[in-house]
Amino acid sequence: MRTFGESRGIRTFAYGAVGEPGPSEELLTSPLLKNIGAAHKKSPEEVALRWVTQGGAAVSVRPTTNFGLGTSTCNGPQCEAGIQARASSFQWSLSNKEMKALDAVTSPDDIPTLFSSSGCPNAFVMPK
């Protein structure tokens, strides 16, 4: 669907690089994202954000993982640090091998998918 839409000028938009409506614990604790993050000195959430943007999708991001739509505000040093960390995702890149490993993540029905939250049908799972 993404290839079809983008071939017609329709951009893919990831509402949340770490899941919606709230952060996906499965994503944030993923050994794949942790290992890739360790290689770059980045967190799993920074890896997820970089994967989405490097793959060419637009993304809406939370300034922190405890920031939720309509449930919290973002003030102070933690918020500022989170915004700076998100902005820094454009200062590094994932390797082709890392991108392929992240691209291989599928839904429970084995359908390729961008990361999604557990509340969504066919949400994110790690490859077996």
Image: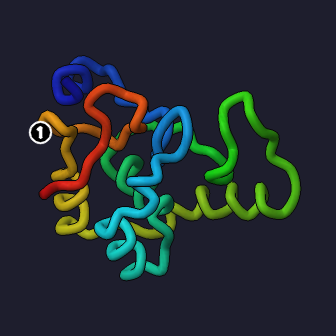
Whole-percent x, y for residue 55 in the image: 31, 48
Residue occupying image coordinates x 50% and y 35%: 20
Does residue 81 lie above or below 105 as drawn?
below
The local crowd at label 1, few if under 14, some if 14 to 19, many if 20 or more residues have their Cα within 10 Å, is few
Q: Which of 110 and 1 is in front in this view?
A: 110
Image-quadrant location for residue 88: bottom right
Label 1 secondary element: loop
With 79 as the anchor, is 31 left or right in this view?
left
Q: Give the residue pinned by disc 1.
A: 110
The percent coordinates of residue 39 (x first, y second) are 37, 81
Q: Is residue 80 left or right of residue 11?
A: right
Query: In which quadrant of the rendered image does the N terminus lie?
Result: top left
Q: Please state which of residues 8 and 19 is positioned toward the viewer in this rendering.
A: 19
Kind of residue at badge 1:
Asp
Which residue shows up at 67% across the image and 31% down it? 69
Q: In which quarter of the image is residue 58?
A: top left
Q: Work out whether 91 lies above or below 10.
A: below
